[in-house]
């Protein structure tokens, strides 16, 4: 007669531990797959915006947002759709970077917002932002991996103690900000690295895709003799939202 109080045998325990291990591995793998899917989806968004900007420039010989004949030649660019002309000076926005206040109503038009309306209303983009607030998912498009996008001209991109050539950039970040990144205002380091690897050279300091943070964040830094050297994405910071990205559009 079996002992009703008998515990698990060693074989049963081994099987149970193996099953639990498999479940945990599947959960971890599932989380990794979801993260990779978000990164891949965000890369597709970025590439579609790049293609849209290229198509718009070919068709209208101008930058979206800056186009000074949008109301005349873009059929749906009307006041009712929140769309109007840019100033035609060859730059989206000003020589600086995006400067709308987070969450503030768009009481005055800004080329960095008009850029998206010009793109979408001309047929070179999808998902027209229908909101009126300077927020991702409202007047600006949001990203699949969190945060959202801005387009603007920057006369000189200063990152990693280096001044890069100016130009038009697609900025991907966690919140709208003119330039400063504070704790939690960016995108996850692992997402930034994943996008860089898929679209460029995997380095935050070279190529057409740049990434940076504020202080010792996002990009690994080494100080020798008072000189700071920047290298790859900071391995210990990958799980923090401390990166912003700039994707060159020209």
Image: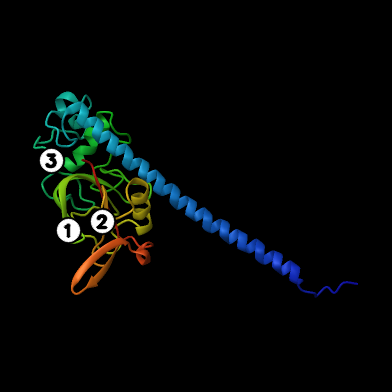
Q: Which mark is residue 250?
A: none
Depth check, mark 2 against mark 3: the one in front is 2
Q: Are marks 2 and 3 in contact (CB under 8 Å)?
A: no
Q: Of callouts 3 and 1, which one flags the residue occurring earlier in the amino acid sequence?
A: 3
Structural distance between the alpha carbons of marks 2 and 3: 24 Å
Q: Dot 2: what SS?
A: loop
Dot 1 alpha-carbon crowd within 10 angstroms: few under 14, some 14 to 19, many 20 or more: few
Q: Are marks 2 and 1 in contact (CB under 8 Å)?
A: yes
**Residue that lies at the very extreme toward the right in this rendered image:** 1
The CA distance from mark 3 to mark 1 is 22 Å
Quadrant of res 87 = top left
Disc 1 element: strand
Q: Which mark is residue 162?
A: 1
Viewer-nearest residue: 41 or 232: 232
Is 84 on the left-hand or right-hand side of 31?
left
The residue carrying pointer 2 sits among few (fewer than 14), some (14 to 19) or many (20 or more) residues within 10 Å by Cα, namely many
Q: Position of residue 21 (x, y in %)?
A: 61, 63
Classify the position of the C terminus by image quarter: top left
Dot 3 crowding, Cα within 10 Å, few <14, some 14–19, many 20+: many
- Mark 2 vs mark 1, CA separation in Å: 9 Å
Q: In this orientation, does residue 146 appear? A: no
Residue 91's disc is: 3
Element type where label 3 sits in the image = loop
Quadrant for the N terminus in the image:
bottom right
The tally of labels here is 3
Residue at 35% over, 65% down: 237
Q: Quadrant of residue 243?
A: bottom left
Location of mark 2 (residue):
205
First in sequence: mark 2 vs mark 3: 3
Residue 82 in the image, given as x and y percentages of width and height = 20, 35
Q: Decide: is 179 above or below 17.
A: above
């Amino acid at each position: 007669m079996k002992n009703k109080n008998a515990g698990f045998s060693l074989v049963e325990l081994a099987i149970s531990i193996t099953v639990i291990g498999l479940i945990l591995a599947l959960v971890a793998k599932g989380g990794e797959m979801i993260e990779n899917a978000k990164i891949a989806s965000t890369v597709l968004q970025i590439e579609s915006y790049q293609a849209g900007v290229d198509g718009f420039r070919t068709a209208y010989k101008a930058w979206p947002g800056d186009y000074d004949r949008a109301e005349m030649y873009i059929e749906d660019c009307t006041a009712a759709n929140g769309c109007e002309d840019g100033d035609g000076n060859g730059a989206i926005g000003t020589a600086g970077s995006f400067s709308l206040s987070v969450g503030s109503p768009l009481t005055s038009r800004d080329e960095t917002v008009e850029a998206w309306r010009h793109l979408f209303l001309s047929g070179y983009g999808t998902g027209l932002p229908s909101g009126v607030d300077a927020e991702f998912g409202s007047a600006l498009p949001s990203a699949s991996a969190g945060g959202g996008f801005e387009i603007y001209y920057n006369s000189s991109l200063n990152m990693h103690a280096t001044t890069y050539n100016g130009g038009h950039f697609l900025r991907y970040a966690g919140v709208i900000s003119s330039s400063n990144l504070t704790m939690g205002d960016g995108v996850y380091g692992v997402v930034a690295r994943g996008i860089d690897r898929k679209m460029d050279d995997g380095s935050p300091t070279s190529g057409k895709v740049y990434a940076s943070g504020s202080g010792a964040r996002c990009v690994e830094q080494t100080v020798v003799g008072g000189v700071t050297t920047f290298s790859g994405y900071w391995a210990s910071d990958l799980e923090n939202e401390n990166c912003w990205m700039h994707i060159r559009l020209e």
